[in-house]
Image: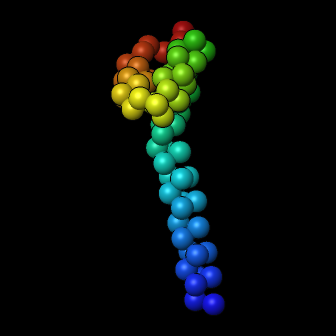
Amino acid sequence: MNGNLDFLIEIILVILLVYIAYKIFTIPISIAKCRHLSSNDVCLIRILTWCGLLCGITWFIAFVIALTFSRKD
């Protein structure tokens, strides 16, 4: 019985960890949407963010772009 409870707690913690990692990972996309950047800029930021799974540096590039690109007029 105790083994089942430990397994359930581990599953819940893994799910929580994946959710937190996803939210942190999508920060550049959220920033771009909140700043009302153009759809092309948001698309570029999304591509760079998801490419960050393969090469982590592109996530930082997407983050900088989301913070520095000018807003849509």
**Percent position of residue 4, x then y:** 62, 82
Residue at image point 60% right, 15% down: 39
| Residue at (48, 15) in percent of width and height | 71
Residue 67, picture quadrant = top left
Q: Is residue 49 visible?
A: no
Picture quadrant of residue 47: top right
Q: Quadrant of the C terminus?
A: top right
Q: Residue at x 58, y 89 (%)?
A: 2
Question: Which corner quadrant holds the N terminus?
Answer: bottom right
Q: Foreground residue, 72 or 27?
A: 27
- Which residue is located at x 58 percent, y 84 percent? 3
Question: From the viewer's perspective, is 38 left or right of 21?
Answer: right
In the image, residue 27 lies at what x, y percent? 48, 37
Q: Residue furthest top?
A: 73
The answer to whether 29 is drawn above or below residue 11 in the figure is above
Q: Residue 43: image x %, image y %?
A: 58, 18
In the displayed structure image, the side of residue 65 where residue 41 appears, left or right: right
Residue 48 in the image: x percent, y percent? 48, 23
Answer with left or right where residue 36 lies relative to residue 24.
right
State how the image is colored: rainbow
In terms of depth relative to the viewer, which is nearer, 70 or 62?
Answer: 62
